[in-house]
């Protein structure tokens, strides 16, 4: 019994304490934020809310699943951008890795806005404790979906939700 308790306290309890609940923010109003994009201009969430769904993707250059997910999100952005869909890729790279963001985005020729959250202030507002973390906001500014992590195929659910929100 002592061994079980020791294993529980050492491994299982910390996992449950630090686990990120995807439902934690769903159904709430998306917190507004204002971040600098790669061109040095400010982008505010409230200024892009209202035309269609907004996909907010928290990512970092050092996160391999993030980079795989971005390929899929870029396809969605290209397909739906003319229907009011907005994508905001928020880099959580810190001072040590921030210099890699702009060259990476340019090398992939991504056209969606990339914002810089070097101190993770916005990530904390959205409870994005780990990357990648996806949040989908409807045109009224309400969070309708959030998801931690990325596995091939996850993008299908996001795409389905985007299509449904565009149709509304």
Image (tube, helix red, strand yellow):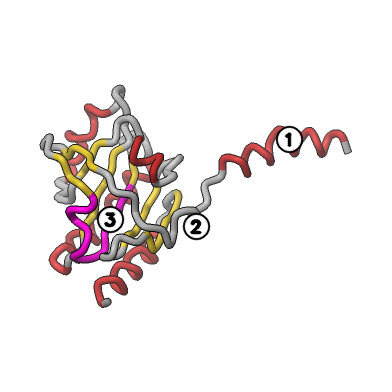
Residue 73: image location, x then y, percent: 28, 55
User: Where does the magenta region start and end?
Assistant: 45-57
Mark 2 nearby-residue class (10 Å; few <14, some 14–19, many ≥20): few
Mark 1 nearby-residue class (10 Å; few <14, some 14–19, many ≥20): few
- Left or right, 163 with respect to 37, comes to right
Q: Where 56 sits versus 62, above or below?
A: below
Residue placed under numbered mark 3 in the picture: 73
Whole-angstrom CA distance, mark 1 to mark 2, is: 25 Å
- Asked whether the residues under the numbered discs 2 and 3 touch, taking CB atoms below 8 Å apart as contact, a structural biologist would say no
Q: Nearer the viewer, residue 109 or 18?
A: 18
Question: Helix or strand or loop: what does disc 3 sit on?
Answer: helix
Q: Earlier in the sequence, mark 1 or mark 2?
A: 1
Residue farthest bottom in this picture: 167
Question: Helix or strand or loop: what does disc 1 sit on?
Answer: helix
Residue placed under numbered mark 2 in the picture: 23
- Left or right, 2 with respect to 151, comes to right
The numbered disc on residue 134 is: none
Task: Indicate whether residue 81 is drawn in magenta.
Answer: no
Name which quarter of the figure residue 100 lies in. Answer: top left
Whole-angstrom CA distance, mark 3 to mark 1, is: 39 Å
């Amino acid at each position: 019994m002592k061994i079980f308790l020791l294993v529980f306290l050492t491994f299982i309890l910390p996992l449950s304490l630090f686990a990120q609940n995807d439902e934690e923010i769903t159904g709430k109003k998306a917190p507004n934020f204002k971040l600098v994009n790669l061109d040095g201009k400010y982008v505010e969430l409230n200024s892009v809310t209202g035309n269609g769904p907004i996909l907010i993707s928290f990512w970092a250059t050092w996160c391999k699943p993030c980079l795989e997910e971005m390929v899929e999100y870029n396809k969605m952005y290209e397909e739906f951008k003319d229907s009011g869909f907005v994508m905001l890729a928020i880099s959580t790279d810190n001072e040590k890795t921030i210099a890699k963001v702009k060259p990476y985005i340019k090398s992939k020729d991504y056209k969606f806005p990339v914002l810089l959250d070097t101190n993770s202030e916005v990530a904390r507002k959205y409870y994005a404790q780990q990357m990648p973390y996806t949040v989908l906001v409807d045109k009224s500014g309400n969070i309708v979906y959030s998801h931690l992590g990325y596995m091939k195929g996850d993008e299908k659910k996001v795409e389905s939700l985007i299509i449904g929100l565009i149709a509304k």
